[in-house]
Image: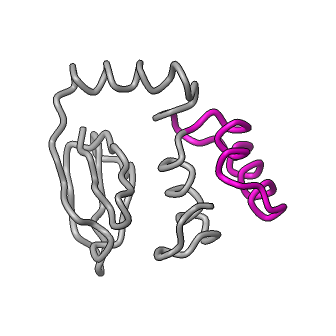
């Protein structure tokens, strides 16, 4: 597991066992399948996480945010998109999706709905 620290104090934890570089992006892989990618310019640092420690962090996060660290489903992405386009703020998105602010902001950026230099309000 890698913690990818991004600009604006944003971060995500990626279950990767390999990294490659592709046209300005860092691509993360696990067991031969791509599990994520981030623009290299957004990455501040990478940290290898202790899995035992990470398990406890996930369990703690899920007490307040039940979907934290879970893969996004197409239905959840559609709900996120609809709510965001409808003007929902970060507190409403957190409540509706059961996810942490950082995970929501990262997904909005990957969907092209939030600019890299824009913060979730």
Which is more toward the observer, 19 or 106?
A: 106
Q: Quadrant of residue 50?
A: top left
> Residue 34 location, x and y as percent?
37, 52
- Is 118 on the left-hand or right-hand side of 16? right
- The structure's colour scheme is one colour
Instruction: Give above or below for 24 relative to 71.
Output: below
Q: Quadrant of the C terminus?
A: bottom right
Magenta residues (range): 70-99
Q: Main secondary structure of the magenta part?
A: helix
Residue ID at (57%, 25%):
66
> Residue 54 location, x and y as percent?
28, 27
Residue ID at (71%, 55%):
89
Residue ID at (60%, 71%):
112
> Residue 88 location, x and y as percent?
77, 55
- Is 83 on the left-hand or right-hand side of 45? right
Residue farthest right in this picture: 86
Task: Please say whether residue 91 is one of the residues in the magenta stretch.
Answer: yes
Task: Please say whether residue 81 is one of the residues in the magenta stretch.
Answer: yes
> Residue 15 location, x and y as percent?
31, 39
Q: Quadrant of the N terminus?
A: top left
Q: How many labels does the image show?
A: 0
Q: Quadrant of residue 97?
A: top right
Which is more toward the observer, 39 or 117?
A: 117
Residue ID at (64%, 69%):
113
């Amino acid at each position: 597991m890698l913690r990818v620290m991004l600009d604006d104090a944003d971060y995500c934890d990626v279950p990767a066992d390999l990294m490659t570089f592709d046209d300005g992006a860092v691509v993360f892989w696990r067991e031969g399948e791509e599990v994520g990618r981030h623009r290299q310019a957004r990455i501040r640092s990478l940290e290898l996480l202790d899995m035992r420690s990470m398990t406890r962090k996930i369990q703690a996060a899920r007490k307040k945010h039940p979907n934290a660290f879970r893969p996004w489903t197409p239905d959840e992405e559609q709900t996120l998109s609809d709510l965001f386009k409808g003007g929902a703020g970060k507190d409403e998105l957190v409540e509706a999706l059961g996810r942490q602010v950082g995970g929501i902001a990262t997904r909005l950026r990957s969907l092209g709905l939030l600019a890299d230099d824009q913060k979730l309000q």
